[in-house]
Protein backbone atom coordinates (compact mmCIF):
# COMPACT_ATOMS: atom_id res chain seq x y z
CA UNK A 1 0.00 0.00 0.00
CA UNK A 2 1.24 3.50 -0.85
CA UNK A 3 0.89 6.59 1.28
CA UNK A 4 -0.10 9.80 -0.52
CA UNK A 5 2.53 12.49 -0.73
CA UNK A 6 2.85 14.83 2.19
CA UNK A 7 3.04 18.55 1.42
CA UNK A 8 6.56 19.81 0.86
CA UNK A 9 6.16 22.14 3.85
CA UNK A 10 5.15 19.30 6.19
CA UNK A 11 7.25 19.40 9.35
CA UNK A 12 8.96 16.26 10.69
CA UNK A 13 10.36 16.21 14.20
CA UNK A 14 10.60 14.44 17.53
CA UNK A 15 9.63 15.33 21.09
CA UNK A 16 10.99 15.05 24.63
CA UNK A 17 10.38 16.79 27.96
CA UNK A 18 12.68 18.31 30.55
CA UNK A 19 12.13 16.07 33.57
CA UNK A 20 12.13 12.95 31.43
CA UNK A 21 15.57 13.48 29.86
CA UNK A 22 17.61 16.26 31.43
CA UNK A 23 18.82 14.83 34.73
CA UNK A 24 21.10 17.20 36.67
CA UNK A 25 18.17 17.57 39.03
CA UNK A 26 20.17 19.28 41.77
CA UNK A 27 22.87 20.97 39.67
CA UNK A 28 23.55 24.56 38.66
CA UNK A 29 20.84 26.06 40.83
CA UNK A 30 17.89 23.90 39.80
CA UNK A 31 15.44 23.45 42.66
CA UNK A 32 13.07 20.49 43.18
CA UNK A 33 9.88 20.08 41.20
CA UNK A 34 6.80 18.21 42.37
CA UNK A 35 8.06 15.21 40.43
CA UNK A 36 11.33 15.17 42.36
CA UNK A 37 9.22 15.05 45.51
CA UNK A 38 6.79 12.44 44.16
CA UNK A 39 9.58 10.10 43.07
CA UNK A 40 10.77 9.94 46.66
CA UNK A 41 7.43 8.65 47.92
CA UNK A 42 7.78 4.95 48.53
CA UNK A 43 6.06 2.77 45.96
CA UNK A 44 4.83 5.55 43.67
CA UNK A 45 7.28 5.00 40.78
CA UNK A 46 8.36 1.60 39.50
CA UNK A 47 11.67 0.45 40.95
CA UNK A 48 11.97 3.67 42.92
CA UNK A 49 13.17 5.40 39.73
CA UNK A 50 13.47 9.17 39.40
CA UNK A 51 14.58 11.83 36.94
CA UNK A 52 17.73 12.61 38.92
CA UNK A 53 19.95 11.46 36.02
CA UNK A 54 17.45 10.39 33.34
CA UNK A 55 19.23 10.59 29.95
CA UNK A 56 21.80 13.08 31.27
CA UNK A 57 20.74 15.41 28.46
CA UNK A 58 21.80 18.44 30.52
CA UNK A 59 25.41 17.36 30.04
CA UNK A 60 25.04 15.51 26.73
CA UNK A 61 22.97 18.08 24.89
CA UNK A 62 25.51 18.72 22.07
CA UNK A 63 25.66 14.99 21.36
CA UNK A 64 21.88 14.76 21.30
CA UNK A 65 21.57 17.69 18.90
CA UNK A 66 24.09 16.05 16.56
CA UNK A 67 21.96 12.92 16.76
CA UNK A 68 18.88 14.94 15.76
CA UNK A 69 20.76 16.36 12.80
CA UNK A 70 21.92 12.90 11.73
CA UNK A 71 18.32 11.70 11.87
CA UNK A 72 17.30 14.60 9.62
CA UNK A 73 14.85 16.20 12.06
CA UNK A 74 13.51 19.56 10.92
CA UNK A 75 12.11 20.44 14.35
CA UNK A 76 12.57 19.47 17.98
CA UNK A 77 9.86 19.84 20.59
CA UNK A 78 11.21 20.08 24.14
CA UNK A 79 10.06 21.61 27.39
CA UNK A 80 11.70 24.22 29.58
CA UNK A 81 12.14 23.27 33.23
CA UNK A 82 10.43 25.97 35.28
CA UNK A 83 12.45 25.10 38.45
CA UNK A 84 15.70 25.38 36.48
CA UNK A 85 14.93 28.97 35.47
CA UNK A 86 13.09 30.09 38.62
CA UNK A 87 14.06 27.83 41.53
CA UNK A 88 11.34 29.31 43.73
CA UNK A 89 8.89 29.45 40.83
CA UNK A 90 8.98 33.25 40.92
CA UNK A 91 11.37 35.99 41.90
CA UNK A 92 15.11 35.38 41.59
CA UNK A 93 16.29 34.04 38.23
CA UNK A 94 18.83 31.22 37.95
CA UNK A 95 21.37 32.28 35.33
CA UNK A 96 22.89 28.83 34.62
CA UNK A 97 19.40 27.54 33.83
CA UNK A 98 18.76 30.36 31.38
CA UNK A 99 22.15 29.73 29.81
CA UNK A 100 21.44 26.03 29.25
CA UNK A 101 18.43 26.73 27.03
CA UNK A 102 20.39 29.44 25.21
CA UNK A 103 22.97 26.80 24.33
CA UNK A 104 20.29 24.30 23.31
CA UNK A 105 18.41 26.75 21.10
CA UNK A 106 21.59 28.01 19.48
CA UNK A 107 22.81 24.47 18.82
CA UNK A 108 19.50 23.53 17.23
CA UNK A 109 19.50 26.55 14.95
CA UNK A 110 23.14 26.00 13.99
CA UNK A 111 22.16 22.49 12.87
CA UNK A 112 19.10 23.58 10.90
CA UNK A 113 16.59 22.32 13.47
CA UNK A 114 13.66 24.50 14.50
CA UNK A 115 13.13 24.77 18.28
CA UNK A 116 9.57 24.20 19.54
CA UNK A 117 9.64 24.80 23.31
CA UNK A 118 6.78 24.05 25.67
CA UNK A 119 6.64 26.14 28.84
CA UNK A 120 5.19 23.48 31.12
CA UNK A 121 5.45 19.71 30.92
CA UNK A 122 4.38 18.83 34.47
CA UNK A 123 7.51 19.76 36.51
CA UNK A 124 5.92 22.45 38.68
CA UNK A 125 8.40 24.05 41.11
CA UNK A 126 7.88 22.50 44.52
CA UNK A 127 8.05 25.97 46.05
CA UNK A 128 4.85 26.93 44.22
CA UNK A 129 3.12 23.72 45.20
CA UNK A 130 3.94 24.64 48.80
CA UNK A 131 1.83 27.79 48.22
CA UNK A 132 -1.15 25.75 47.06
CA UNK A 133 0.00 25.02 43.54
CA UNK A 134 -2.74 25.01 40.95
CA UNK A 135 -5.45 25.44 43.60
CA UNK A 136 -4.11 28.98 44.07
CA UNK A 137 -5.56 31.44 41.57
CA UNK A 138 -2.30 33.41 41.74
CA UNK A 139 -0.72 30.64 39.66
CA UNK A 140 -2.01 32.36 36.52
CA UNK A 141 0.07 35.43 37.28
CA UNK A 142 3.12 33.42 38.28
CA UNK A 143 2.93 31.44 35.05
CA UNK A 144 2.59 34.67 33.05
CA UNK A 145 5.74 36.01 34.73
CA UNK A 146 7.60 32.81 33.85
CA UNK A 147 6.36 33.08 30.24
CA UNK A 148 7.58 36.69 30.14
CA UNK A 149 11.06 35.61 31.25
CA UNK A 150 11.19 32.96 28.52
CA UNK A 151 9.81 35.27 25.85
CA UNK A 152 12.31 38.03 26.55
CA UNK A 153 15.23 35.63 26.73
CA UNK A 154 14.49 33.33 23.79
CA UNK A 155 11.89 35.10 21.67
CA UNK A 156 14.49 36.59 19.33
CA UNK A 157 15.25 33.05 18.09
CA UNK A 158 12.12 31.03 18.84
CA UNK A 159 8.81 31.60 17.07
CA UNK A 160 6.81 28.43 17.81
CA UNK A 161 5.67 28.13 21.42
CA UNK A 162 3.41 25.79 23.37
CA UNK A 163 2.02 26.81 26.74
CA UNK A 164 1.24 23.49 28.44
CA UNK A 165 1.52 19.80 27.60
CA UNK A 166 -1.43 17.45 28.15
CA UNK A 167 -3.57 19.50 30.50
CA UNK A 168 -6.05 16.70 31.15
CA UNK A 169 -3.48 14.02 31.92
CA UNK A 170 -1.57 15.83 34.63
CA UNK A 171 -4.71 17.29 36.20
CA UNK A 172 -6.60 13.99 36.34
CA UNK A 173 -3.63 11.89 37.40
CA UNK A 174 -2.17 14.41 39.82
CA UNK A 175 -5.18 16.13 41.36
CA UNK A 176 -8.18 13.78 40.90
CA UNK A 177 -6.80 10.25 41.18
CA UNK A 178 -3.50 10.82 43.00
CA UNK A 179 -1.53 8.63 40.61
CA UNK A 180 1.02 11.29 39.71
CA UNK A 181 2.58 14.34 41.29
CA UNK A 182 1.54 15.89 43.61
CA UNK A 183 -0.63 12.89 44.55
CA UNK A 184 -3.89 14.65 45.42
CA UNK A 185 -7.39 13.18 45.11
CA UNK A 186 -9.95 15.89 45.77
CA UNK A 187 -12.86 17.12 43.63
CA UNK A 188 -12.67 20.78 44.61
CA UNK A 189 -8.88 20.87 44.18
CA UNK A 190 -9.22 19.19 40.79
CA UNK A 191 -11.86 21.65 39.58
CA UNK A 192 -9.84 24.65 40.73
CA UNK A 193 -6.81 23.19 38.99
CA UNK A 194 -8.66 22.81 35.68
CA UNK A 195 -9.77 26.42 35.77
CA UNK A 196 -6.53 27.95 37.05
CA UNK A 197 -4.45 26.03 34.49
CA UNK A 198 -6.74 27.41 31.79
CA UNK A 199 -6.31 30.93 33.18
CA UNK A 200 -2.54 30.46 33.21
CA UNK A 201 -2.61 29.30 29.60
CA UNK A 202 -4.54 32.40 28.53
CA UNK A 203 -2.22 34.71 30.43
CA UNK A 204 0.85 33.11 28.86
CA UNK A 205 -0.64 33.39 25.36
CA UNK A 206 -1.09 37.13 25.85
CA UNK A 207 2.49 37.53 27.10
CA UNK A 208 4.02 35.56 24.24
CA UNK A 209 1.95 37.39 21.62
CA UNK A 210 2.85 40.76 23.10
CA UNK A 211 6.57 40.08 23.44
CA UNK A 212 7.38 38.11 20.28
CA UNK A 213 6.58 39.54 16.89
CA UNK A 214 5.08 36.89 14.65
CA UNK A 215 4.87 34.31 17.43
CA UNK A 216 3.10 31.06 16.52
CA UNK A 217 1.42 29.97 19.74
CA UNK A 218 -0.40 26.76 20.54
CA UNK A 219 -1.18 24.31 23.32
CA UNK A 220 -0.78 20.55 23.46
CA UNK A 221 -3.70 18.26 24.26
CA UNK A 222 -3.99 14.54 24.78
CA UNK A 223 -6.91 13.53 22.58
CA UNK A 224 -7.97 9.90 22.43
CA UNK A 225 -11.44 8.81 21.20
CA UNK A 226 -13.34 7.74 24.33
CA UNK A 227 -15.82 4.93 23.93
CA UNK A 228 -18.09 3.22 26.47
CA UNK A 229 -16.90 -0.28 27.35
CA UNK A 230 -20.52 -1.53 27.21
CA UNK A 231 -23.66 -0.07 25.71
CA UNK A 232 -25.35 0.30 29.08
CA UNK A 233 -26.80 3.60 30.31
CA UNK A 234 -24.28 3.66 33.17
CA UNK A 235 -21.22 3.13 30.96
CA UNK A 236 -22.46 5.53 28.27
CA UNK A 237 -22.97 8.29 30.85
CA UNK A 238 -19.62 7.60 32.52
CA UNK A 239 -17.77 7.61 29.20
CA UNK A 240 -19.41 10.92 28.26
CA UNK A 241 -18.18 12.54 31.49
CA UNK A 242 -14.75 10.93 31.04
CA UNK A 243 -14.62 12.38 27.52
CA UNK A 244 -15.34 15.89 28.79
CA UNK A 245 -12.63 15.67 31.43
CA UNK A 246 -10.05 14.09 29.12
CA UNK A 247 -10.69 15.57 25.68
CA UNK A 248 -12.84 18.69 25.99
CA UNK A 249 -12.32 20.59 29.26
CA UNK A 250 -9.26 22.47 28.07
CA UNK A 251 -9.48 23.00 24.28
CA UNK A 252 -13.18 23.90 24.42
CA UNK A 253 -12.47 26.60 27.00
CA UNK A 254 -9.35 27.86 25.24
CA UNK A 255 -10.65 27.87 21.66
CA UNK A 256 -14.46 27.86 21.82
CA UNK A 257 -14.74 30.03 24.93
CA UNK A 258 -16.82 27.73 27.12
CA UNK A 259 -16.57 24.58 29.19
CA UNK A 260 -18.41 21.47 27.96
CA UNK A 261 -21.81 21.10 29.64
CA UNK A 262 -21.18 18.35 32.18
CA UNK A 263 -18.03 20.01 33.50
CA UNK A 264 -19.44 23.53 33.28
CA UNK A 265 -21.95 22.91 36.02
CA UNK A 266 -19.24 21.57 38.36
CA UNK A 267 -16.69 24.27 37.67
CA UNK A 268 -19.06 27.25 37.69
CA UNK A 269 -18.42 28.13 41.38
CA UNK A 270 -14.77 28.85 40.58
CA UNK A 271 -15.33 30.99 37.47
CA UNK A 272 -15.21 34.75 38.01
CA UNK A 273 -16.51 37.49 35.73
CA UNK A 274 -14.34 37.85 32.63
CA UNK A 275 -12.50 34.58 33.14
CA UNK A 276 -13.58 32.90 29.92
CA UNK A 277 -12.38 35.88 27.88
CA UNK A 278 -9.03 35.62 29.68
CA UNK A 279 -8.81 31.94 28.78
CA UNK A 280 -10.01 32.11 25.16
CA UNK A 281 -7.08 33.87 23.47
CA UNK A 282 -6.05 33.71 19.80
CA UNK A 283 -3.98 30.63 18.93
CA UNK A 284 -2.18 29.76 15.72
CA UNK A 285 -2.04 25.96 16.03
CA UNK A 286 -3.41 22.94 17.90
CA UNK A 287 -1.02 20.33 19.28
CA UNK A 288 -2.37 16.79 19.67
CA UNK A 289 -0.79 13.86 21.46
CA UNK A 290 -2.50 10.70 20.28
CA UNK A 291 -1.72 7.06 21.02
CA UNK A 292 -4.84 4.90 21.23
CA UNK A 293 -8.61 4.90 21.65
CA UNK A 294 -9.77 4.67 25.26
CA UNK A 295 -12.64 2.67 26.69
CA UNK A 296 -14.41 4.04 29.74
CA UNK A 297 -17.16 2.97 32.04
CA UNK A 298 -18.78 3.50 35.41
CA UNK A 299 -16.44 2.91 38.36
CA UNK A 300 -17.68 3.79 41.83
CA UNK A 301 -14.15 3.39 43.24
CA UNK A 302 -12.79 6.29 41.17
CA UNK A 303 -13.23 9.98 41.88
CA UNK A 304 -15.89 11.31 39.45
CA UNK A 305 -17.29 7.80 39.01
CA UNK A 306 -15.63 6.89 35.73
CA UNK A 307 -12.58 4.86 34.87
CA UNK A 308 -10.97 2.67 32.24
CA UNK A 309 -12.95 -0.24 30.89
CA UNK A 310 -12.03 -3.39 29.03
CA UNK A 311 -10.54 -3.06 25.56
CA UNK A 312 -12.20 -5.22 22.89
CA UNK A 313 -10.27 -8.45 22.57
CA UNK A 314 -10.04 -8.19 18.80
CA UNK A 315 -7.92 -5.02 18.90
CA UNK A 316 -4.15 -5.52 18.69
CA UNK A 317 -2.14 -4.14 21.61
CA UNK A 318 1.17 -2.32 21.91
CA UNK A 319 3.93 -3.55 24.18
CA UNK A 320 2.39 -1.66 27.09
CA UNK A 321 -1.09 -3.00 26.40
CA UNK A 322 -2.59 0.01 24.65
CA UNK A 323 -4.97 -0.78 21.78
CA UNK A 324 -3.65 0.02 18.33
CA UNK A 325 -6.14 1.40 15.81
CA UNK A 326 -4.69 3.71 13.14
CA UNK A 327 -8.14 4.59 11.83
CA UNK A 328 -8.91 6.16 15.23
CA UNK A 329 -5.91 8.43 14.64
CA UNK A 330 -7.27 9.41 11.23
CA UNK A 331 -10.70 10.12 12.70
CA UNK A 332 -9.16 12.19 15.50
CA UNK A 333 -7.28 14.43 13.08
CA UNK A 334 -10.42 15.01 11.04
CA UNK A 335 -12.50 15.72 14.15
CA UNK A 336 -9.98 18.25 15.49
CA UNK A 337 -9.90 20.07 12.16
CA UNK A 338 -13.69 20.32 12.10
CA UNK A 339 -14.16 21.23 15.75
CA UNK A 340 -11.41 23.79 16.33
CA UNK A 341 -10.53 25.05 12.83
CA UNK A 342 -6.84 25.43 13.60
CA UNK A 343 -3.81 23.90 11.89
CA UNK A 344 -2.97 20.67 13.71
CA UNK A 345 0.49 19.45 14.66
CA UNK A 346 0.86 15.91 15.97
CA UNK A 347 3.14 16.68 18.91
CA UNK A 348 3.32 13.11 20.24
CA UNK A 349 2.66 9.71 18.73
CA UNK A 350 4.56 6.52 19.34
CA UNK A 351 4.80 2.96 20.58
CA UNK A 352 5.58 1.94 24.15
CA UNK A 353 7.10 -1.38 25.12
CA UNK A 354 8.17 -2.97 28.35
CA UNK A 355 11.91 -3.21 28.87
CA UNK A 356 12.71 -6.91 29.16
CA UNK A 357 16.42 -6.27 29.42
CA UNK A 358 17.10 -7.48 25.90
CA UNK A 359 19.10 -4.76 24.18
CA UNK A 360 18.98 -6.38 20.72
CA UNK A 361 15.18 -6.42 20.81
CA UNK A 362 15.13 -2.76 21.78
CA UNK A 363 17.28 -1.81 18.80
CA UNK A 364 15.59 -4.10 16.25
CA UNK A 365 12.18 -2.75 17.30
CA UNK A 366 10.03 -4.00 14.45
CA UNK A 367 6.79 -3.53 16.40
CA UNK A 368 7.50 0.17 16.92
CA UNK A 369 8.53 0.54 13.29
CA UNK A 370 5.27 -1.06 12.15
CA UNK A 371 3.28 1.19 14.47
CA UNK A 372 4.91 4.33 13.06
CA UNK A 373 4.33 3.12 9.50
CA UNK A 374 0.65 2.43 10.07
CA UNK A 375 -0.05 5.62 12.01
CA UNK A 376 1.82 7.86 9.59
CA UNK A 377 -0.11 6.19 6.75
CA UNK A 378 -3.35 6.96 8.63
CA UNK A 379 -2.24 10.56 9.03
CA UNK A 380 -1.65 10.75 5.29
CA UNK A 381 -5.16 9.45 4.71
CA UNK A 382 -6.51 12.09 7.09
CA UNK A 383 -4.78 14.81 5.06
CA UNK A 384 -6.27 13.39 1.89
CA UNK A 385 -9.72 13.49 3.52
CA UNK A 386 -9.34 17.14 4.50
CA UNK A 387 -7.57 17.23 7.88
CA UNK A 388 -5.37 20.31 8.23
CA UNK A 389 -2.28 18.61 9.65
CA UNK A 390 0.98 20.52 9.28
CA UNK A 391 3.57 18.40 11.11
CA UNK A 392 4.43 15.25 13.07
CA UNK A 393 6.68 14.81 16.10
CA UNK A 394 7.52 11.24 17.08
CA UNK A 395 7.43 10.36 20.76
CA UNK A 396 10.06 10.02 21.76
CA UNK A 397 13.48 10.93 20.50
CA UNK A 398 15.10 9.00 23.36
CA UNK A 399 14.11 6.25 25.72
CA UNK A 400 13.56 8.16 28.95
CA UNK A 401 11.94 8.39 32.38
CA UNK A 402 8.30 7.48 31.75
CA UNK A 403 6.73 8.96 34.87
CA UNK A 404 5.14 6.27 37.08
CA UNK A 405 6.56 3.52 34.86
CA UNK A 406 10.09 4.74 35.54
CA UNK A 407 12.66 3.32 33.14
CA UNK A 408 10.79 0.06 32.60
CA UNK A 409 8.89 1.43 29.60
CA UNK A 410 10.53 2.64 26.42
CA UNK A 411 9.11 4.84 23.67
CA UNK A 412 12.31 6.08 22.03
CA UNK A 413 13.35 5.77 18.42
CA UNK A 414 16.84 5.95 19.92
CA UNK A 415 17.88 3.39 22.54
CA UNK A 416 19.51 4.68 25.72
CA UNK A 417 21.64 2.29 27.73
CA UNK A 418 21.09 3.94 31.10
CA UNK A 419 24.24 2.68 32.92
CA UNK A 420 26.53 3.99 30.15
CA UNK A 421 24.22 6.61 28.55
CA UNK A 422 25.17 5.23 25.14
CA UNK A 423 22.71 6.21 22.39
CA UNK A 424 21.92 3.79 19.54
CA UNK A 425 19.42 4.50 16.78
CA UNK A 426 16.79 1.76 16.62
CA UNK A 427 15.32 0.22 13.48
CA UNK A 428 12.31 2.52 13.93
CA UNK A 429 14.60 5.55 14.12
CA UNK A 430 16.42 4.51 10.96
CA UNK A 431 13.11 4.09 9.15
CA UNK A 432 11.84 7.46 10.36
CA UNK A 433 15.11 9.12 9.40
CA UNK A 434 14.94 7.65 5.89
CA UNK A 435 11.35 8.82 5.53
CA UNK A 436 12.41 12.38 6.36
CA UNK A 437 15.48 12.29 4.15
CA UNK A 438 13.49 10.94 1.21
CA UNK A 439 11.13 13.90 1.56
CA UNK A 440 14.08 16.27 1.54
CA UNK A 441 15.34 14.68 -1.66
CA UNK A 442 11.99 15.34 -3.26
CA UNK A 443 10.58 11.81 -3.27
CA UNK A 444 6.83 11.99 -3.39
CA UNK A 445 5.56 8.59 -2.28
CA UNK A 446 6.49 6.29 0.58
CA UNK A 447 5.73 2.61 0.90
CA UNK A 448 4.45 1.35 4.22
CA UNK A 449 6.99 -1.47 3.94
CA UNK A 450 9.85 1.04 3.91
CA UNK A 451 10.87 4.26 2.18
CA UNK A 452 11.50 4.08 -1.52
CA UNK A 453 14.95 4.92 -2.78
CA UNK A 454 13.97 6.33 -6.14
CA UNK A 455 11.64 9.02 -7.40
Image (cartoon, rainbow, N blue to C red):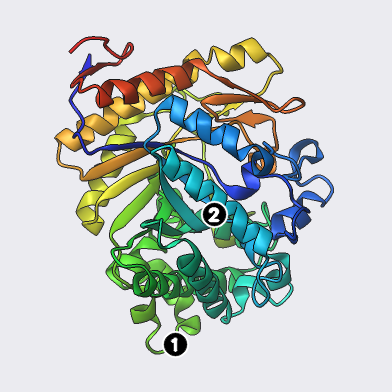
Given residues 172 and 239, the one toward you in this image is 172
Residue 280 horizontal side relative to residue 349, left or right:
left
Between discs 2 and 1, the one toward the N terminus:
2
Given residues 190 and 108, the one toward you in this image is 108
Say few, some or many: other residues with alpha carbon within 10 Å of mark 2 (under 14 / 14 to 19 / 20 or more): some
Spot the residue most to the front: 110
Up-down: is 106 above or below 266?
above
Of badges 2 and 1, the one in the foreground is: 2
Query: Which type of secondary structure does the marked residue at label 1 adopt?
Result: loop
Q: CA distance from mark 2 to mark 1?
A: 38 Å
| Image location (x, y in percent) of residue 103 | 56, 49
The quadrant holding residue 294 is top left
Given residues 450 and 92, the one toward you in this image is 92
| Image location (x, y in percent) of residue 168 | 49, 57
Residue at 20% from the left image edge and 45% from the top image edge: 388
Residue at 77% from the left image edge and 53% from the top image edge: 27
Say few, some or many: other residues with alpha carbon within 10 Å of mark 1 (under 14 / 14 to 19 / 20 or more): few
The circle on residue 200 is none
Is residue 29 at least partly visible in the picture?
yes
Quadrant of the snapshot with the N terminus: top left
Number of numbered callouts drawn: 2
Q: Which residue is mark 1?
A: 272
Residue at 36% from the left image edge and 57% from the top image edge: 159
Query: Which type of secondary structure does the marked residue at label 2 adopt?
Result: helix
Q: Which residue is mark 2?
A: 102
Is residue 322 at least partly visible in the picture?
no
Given residues 206 and 66, the one toward you in this image is 66
Up-down: is 349 above or below 138?
above
Amino acid sequence: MKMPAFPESFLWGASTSSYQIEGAAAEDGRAPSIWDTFCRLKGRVNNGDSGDVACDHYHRMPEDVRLMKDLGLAAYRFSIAWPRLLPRGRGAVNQPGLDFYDRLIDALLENGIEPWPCLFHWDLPQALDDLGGWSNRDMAGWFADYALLCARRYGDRVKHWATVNEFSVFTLFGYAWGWGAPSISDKAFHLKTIHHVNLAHGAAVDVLADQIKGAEIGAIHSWQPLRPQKQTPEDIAAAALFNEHWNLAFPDAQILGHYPPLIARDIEPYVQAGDMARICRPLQWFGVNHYAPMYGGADANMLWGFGWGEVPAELPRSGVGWPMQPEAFKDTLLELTRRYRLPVYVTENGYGSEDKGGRAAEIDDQERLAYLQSYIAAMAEALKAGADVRGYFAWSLLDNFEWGAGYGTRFGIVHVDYPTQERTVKASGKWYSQLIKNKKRGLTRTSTSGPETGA
